[in-house]
Amino acid sequence: FKHSRHPLIVEFQGLGKYYLNESGPDRASKDNHARHMRLANAGFTVFNLVWADLFRSEMFTAIKKHIAESRPHQPKPTP
């Protein structure tokens, strides 16, 4: 999920994308890391949630704090 005004993305991590990938889990892991780095390099903060996080308040508190402390995202102009 991408926040509409802040440089924030929240992703849900599951094992399925690694083991259901036609190229295998190693390729899926490399692709996921490359995508994560592109987002980080573009100025986004990425929170990765797993099932257990849905039942803990700490992650949601951290996300709310990030929103409160961050400035709205200014997209980089395209050349």
Image (cartoon, rainbow, N blue to C red):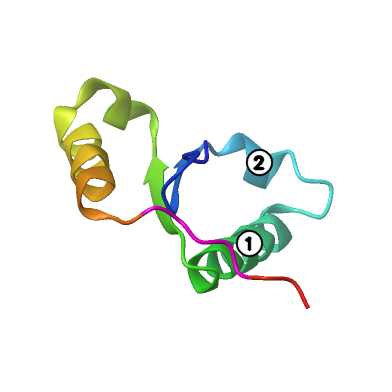
Judge left or right: residue 38 versus residue 63.
right
Q: Return the residue found at the far bottom.
A: 79
Residue 20 figure quarter: top right
**What's the mark number on residue 45?**
none
Tell me which amino acid carries mark 1.
Arg
Percent position of residue 66, x then y: 25, 49
Query: Of the residues under marks 1 and 2, which one precedes in the sequence?
Result: 2
Percent position of residue 26, x then y: 67, 62
Q: 18 or 67, which is in the foreground? A: 67
The C terminus, quarter of image: bottom right
Q: Main secondary structure of the magenta part?
A: loop
- Residue at the spot 19% in from the left edge and 27% down from the top edge: 56
Tell me which amino acid carries mark 2.
Lys
- Residue at the spot 46% in from the left edge and 56% down from the top edge: 73
- Residue at the spot 63% in from the left edge and 68% down from the top edge: 34
Q: Could you tell me how many numbered marks the image carries?
A: 2
Q: Is residue 75 magenta?
A: yes
Q: Which residue is mark 1?
A: 35
Percent position of residue 47, x then y: 38, 48
Point out the stretch of residues depicted in magenta: 72-76
Q: Eyeballing the image, is 77 above or below 48?
A: below
Q: Eyeballing the image, is 21 above or below 27?
A: above
Judge left or right: residue 38 versus residue 61.
right
Judge left or right: residue 34 versus residue 65.
right
Q: Which residue is mark 2?
A: 17
Residue 65 figure quarter: top left
> Is the residue marked by circle 1 packed among few (<14), some (14-19), or many (20+) residues within 10 Å?
few
- Residue at the spot 39% in from the left edge and 52% down from the top edge: 72
Percent position of residue 30, x then y: 65, 66
Q: Is residue 32 magenta?
A: no
Q: Eyeballing the image, is 42 above or below 9?
A: below
Q: 64 or 10, which is in the foreground? A: 64
